Amino acid sequence: MPKRASVACLVLWAPALDRAEIRGLMSAEERARYERFAEPADRARFATARALVRTAMGRATGVAPDLVRFDRRCRHCGGPHGKPWVPGAAVKFSLSHSGGRVVVALAEHAEPGVDVERIVGRQIARLAPRVLSARELLDLEAVPPRDRPAAYHVYWTRKEAVLKAVGRGLSSSLRGITVSGPDRPAELRHWEAEFGPPAIAMSDLRPGRGYAAALALETPGRIDLTERYLDDPLDAP
Ligand SMILES: CC(C)(COP(=O)(O)OP(=O)(O)OC[C@H]1O[C@@H](n2cnc3c(N)ncnc32)[C@H](O)[C@@H]1OP(=O)(O)O)[C@@H](O)C(=O)NCCC(=O)NCCS
């Protein structure tokens, strides 16, 4: 069997911080979004994600972080709600934040999708039938009740990572996607999509205790993953 080419993907983790130097990188539009968050924790996650992406994409494109320009036009419908990208840059990115975690995935010439979620136990019995495929639901029912919240979030992050890689977000059905279960490495098994689904490679990430996280990359190749944990988003390489 021919060996699949590998695509390098850098995943950067940072703690959610909110301080003047970090806020100072935001555009006027980002600042307005930041101001609309009432909760300090939401503000810190948002500001950190902007700083992490701006620092990493600034390094990748040779532009000062505060001067990086983003476009949010959806590549599927042209609407203004899409996955952000930097016009002209070979490096593509995806970001996610939850609880105290902020994560950005970067890859050259391949679209990444990353998702992190804090594991919470509430409402899983109600949510699972809306999110999981028939096969995944059966597998979740076989998991001991105390382990179900973690298992459910593994499924969720794997599916959301896939949708974020292709830029569709939650506008597409999560139940139409079947991923491997929590006892197996991350893998897209089946996608009943109304469009021709692209080749997707997946990897699990290490977000730390109390969180689930996954990475998807739009590529027929394998992922050559580097995961780095920064103390500060401004240290992004
Ligand atoms: C993308 C989405 C899944 C993120 O959900 P979430 O769990 O609340 O948030 P996360 O922290 O994991 O990710 C948020 C980031 O995802 C990115 N994002 C937004 N839309 C995206 C999309 N369509 N695809 C991939 N990434 C997207 C953004 O960078 C966003 O952060 P920012 O707004 O601060 O830049 C959700 O916002 C969504 O489904 N949006 C709708 C997209 C849509 O309607 N698309 C229509 C296609 S025709």
Image (cartoon, helix red, strand yellow):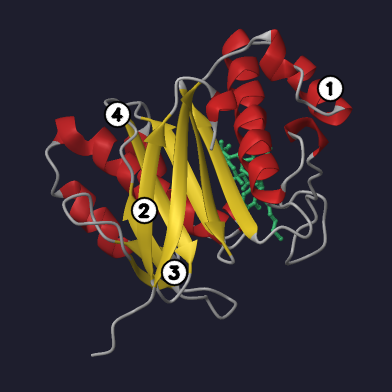
Name the side, left or right, on which 193 lies relative to 126: right
In percent of the image, x 66 and y 44: which residue is there?
Answer: 57
Q: Amino acid at mark 3?
A: Ile
Q: Is residue 46 above or below residue 134?
A: above
Q: Are marks 4 and 3 in contact (CB under 8 Å)?
A: no
Q: Is residue 141 visible?
A: yes
Q: Tell me the tag on residue 225.
A: 2
Q: Are marks 2 and 1 in contact (CB under 8 Å)?
A: no
Name the mark nearer the viewer: 2 or 3. 2
Instruction: Kindly report the distance in space between the C-alpha atoms of the residues bearing marks 4 and 3.
Output: 25 Å
Which element carries disc 1, helix, strand or loop? Answer: helix
In percent of the image, x 60 and y 24: which residue is there?
Answer: 48
In percent of the image, x 57 and y 41: which residue is there?
Answer: 95
* Residue beneath disc 4: 208
Instruction: Kindly report the distance in space between the C-alpha atoms of the residues bearing marks 2 and 3.
Output: 14 Å
Instruction: Kindly report the distance in space between the C-alpha atoms of the residues bearing marks 4 and 1.
Output: 31 Å
For label 4, the crowd category at 10 Å Cα-Cα, with few meaning under 14, some 14 to 19 and many 20 or more, is few
Q: Tell me the tag on residue 200.
A: 3
* Residue beneath disc 1: 32
Name the side, left or right, on which 15 lies relative to 210: right
Of the numbered discs 4 and 3, the one sitting upstream in the chain is 3
Which element carries disc 3, helix, strand or loop? Answer: strand
Name the side, left or right, on which 12 lies relative to 29: left
Q: Amino acid at mark 1?
A: Ala
Q: What is the x, y in percent for residue 222?
A: 36, 69
The part of the image, by quadrant, that contains residue 133 is bottom left
In percent of the image, x 57 and y 48: which residue is there?
Answer: 94
Name the mark nearer the viewer: 2 or 1. 2
Q: Amino acid at mark 4?
A: Gly
Of the numbered discs 4 and 1, the one sitting upstream in the chain is 1
For label 1, the crowd category at 10 Å Cα-Cα, with few meaning under 14, some 14 to 19 and many 20 or more, is few
Query: For ligand 1, which image quadrant applies?
Result: top right
